[in-house]
Image: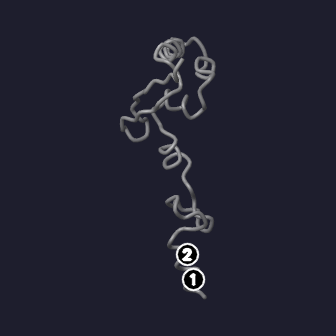
């Protein structure tokens, strides 16, 4: 028996972008769980017990883990608490520039 998977396409509640994710479920398993969840037949974790939380989040909202990190759980500068790109793990460029200007 081969590996089963289904590609699911959802519109992100954050960006409005159409995103897709491959889920480790057969098409029938996905449709059965989706129908049960949409009809109020249980919590999403009960309808899709084998999926990871980020996969269930995607089914509910269309939000990918990358969008979640960027928009919901952004990285902050440890000095000024401004949001920074993930390339800066300690501080933002502005704080870095000011810290080194004082030396």
Q: Judge whether 97 appears above or below 1 on screen.
A: below
Q: Cβ–Cβ below 8 Å for labels 1 and 2? A: yes
Residue 44: x and y, percent? 58, 21
Horizontal side, residue 17 vs residue 87: left or right = left
Task: Locate residue 68, reporting x and y percent.
Answer: 52, 43
- Kindly identify which numbered label has been placed on residue 96: 2
Front-most of residues 26 and 68:
26
Residue marked by disc 1: 100
Mark 2 burial class by Cα count in 10 Å: few <14, some 14-19, many 20+: some
Secondary structure beneath label 1: helix
Query: In percent of the image, x 47 and y 44: which residue is there?
Result: 67
Q: Height in image: 24 above or below 18?
A: above
**Residue 46, image x and y in percent?**
63, 18
Q: Secondary structure at mark 2?
A: helix
* Nearer to us in this view, 19 or 40: 19
Percent coordinates x, y for residue 49 in the rendering: 63, 21
Q: In the drawing, does residue 72 fall left or right of residue 45?
A: left
Q: CA distance from mark 1 to mark 2?
A: 6 Å
Q: Which quadrant is the N terminus positioned in?
A: top right
The C terminus lies in quadrant: bottom right
User: Residue, x 51% and y 12% (percent of image)?
Assistant: 32
Rendered position, 14 above or below 36: below
* Residue depicted at 41% across the width and 29% down the height: 10
Decide which of 41, 48 is in the foreground and name it. Answer: 48
| Classed neighbour count for the residue bearing mark 1: other residues with Cα under 10 Å, few (<14), some (14–19), many (≥20) | few
């Amino acid at each position: 028996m081969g590996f089963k998977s289904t590609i699911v396409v959802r519109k992100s509640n954050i960006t409005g972008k159409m995103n897709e994710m491959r889920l480790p479920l057969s098409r029938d398993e996905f449709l059965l769980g989706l129908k049960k969840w949409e009809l109020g037949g249980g919590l999403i974790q009960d309808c899709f017990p084998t999926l990871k939380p980020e996969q269930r989040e995607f089914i509910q909202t269309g939000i990918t883990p990358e969008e979640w990190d960027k928009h919901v759980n952004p990285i902050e500068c440890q000095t000024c608490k401004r949001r920074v790109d993930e390339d800066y793990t300690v501080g933002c460029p502005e704080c870095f520039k000011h810290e080194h200007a004082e030396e």
